[in-house]
Amino acid sequence: MMSAIVAQRRAVATDVVEVTLRSADGRPLSAWSPGAHIDLDLGPGLVRSYSLCGKPGDVEHYRIAVLREPDSRGGSEAVHQKLHIGSTVPITGPRNNFALDPAPSYLFIAGGIGITPLLPMIEHAEVVGARWRLLYGGRRRLSMAYVAELEEFGRNVVIRPEEQHGLLKLADAISANATDELIYCCGPERLLQAVEDHCAVVGRSHSLRVERFKPKPTQSETAKSEFLIELGGSGEVLAVPADRTILDVLRDAGIDVLSSCEEGTCGSCEQNVLAGVPDHRDSVLTAEEQASGDRMMVCVSRCLSPTLHLDIEPEPGSTYASPSSRHP
């Protein structure tokens, strides 16, 4: 964790504030790639993840844009109310669960504040000369961030506020013939589900990458029951009751695992699995990654075998950040 200072702040849409951070000690920030997030420690028990939306090569500043959510758990309100120019905030990261894979062509689909992780992807596609197009929807034009900047790309960008055009015409955008095109989508659940459905119909599910801000509704229906977790090579075994999470039990044992959303959407609590069968209930890992069974999100996922062996050594006070190589 490091301390950052708010260098700039501006409104980029109705109820959306852009915050630009720099390191408090003047040192360069850690390098990052399109799709990356940082965690902001906004107060006791209030750690939240936000997409980096600046230029991928910029290690002098981190830029985020945050929508004020009236029904949120306090993170967006804290950003809007507390982070002003000169304010300091502890940050962790960056890490990336939504990495941009190399491809000759991209279709980007954004809904509302879901535009933020796609902005650096567009920047990267421009730099490497890949073909790309963006379909961007929102409830109202005034609520859609970065519209003016995106319109400068001309015909590559289609902006469709719902109040004027209705829902996005996904069937027109998602073609079965675009075999060399990857699809990246971020936004509200109804958009993500609609895109997943369209991709399934035309056989493009393998080309789709999505990022969720909230847990996918279709979580595992496996009944919750007690199981055991074994920690590293110590042989120490802890019981996880049916009404508690692995994360809860680790914390009770004095083991500090990095976490943020605690809903299975951010990936910060990801841990390696040495043995056992995870019951995945996250919205981060792909179906293939879940099937491999070698890592899991301990905030929501459980266990289908009697015991789960995790690559965590029981050293009270140590912080176990995500070990995944996908997190730069």
Image: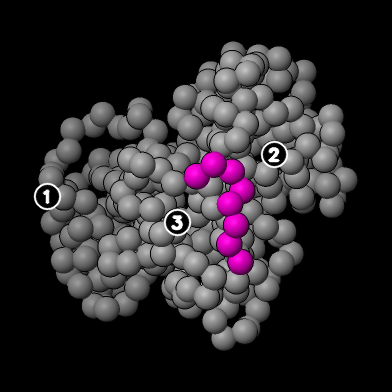
Residue at mark 3 to residue at mark 1: CA–CA distance? 38 Å
- The first of marks 1 and 2 along the sequence is 2
Q: Is residue 169 left or right of residue 219?
A: right
- Examine the rendered structure and indicate whether residue 78 appears above or below residue 118: below
User: Can you tell which mark lies on residue 90?
Assistant: none
- The first of marks 3 and 1 along the sequence is 3
Q: Is residue 89 magenta?
A: no
The residue where tag 2 is placed is 147
Residue at mark 3 to residue at mark 2: CA–CA distance? 21 Å
- Examine the rendered structure and indicate whether residue 227 appears above or below residue 131: below
Q: Amino acid at mark 1?
A: Pro
Looking at the rendering, which quadrant does residue 148 occupy? Answer: top right
Residue at screen point 44% across, 73% down: 90
Helix, strand or loop at mark 1:
loop
Residue at screen point 71% across, 14% down: 172
The residue where tag 3 is placed is 80
The residue where tag 1 is placed is 241
Residue 299, position in %: x, y?
Answer: 30, 52
Tag 1: Cα neighbours inside 10 Å, few (<14), some, or many (≥20)? some
The stretch in magenta equals 8-15
Residue at screen point 26% across, 45% down: 302
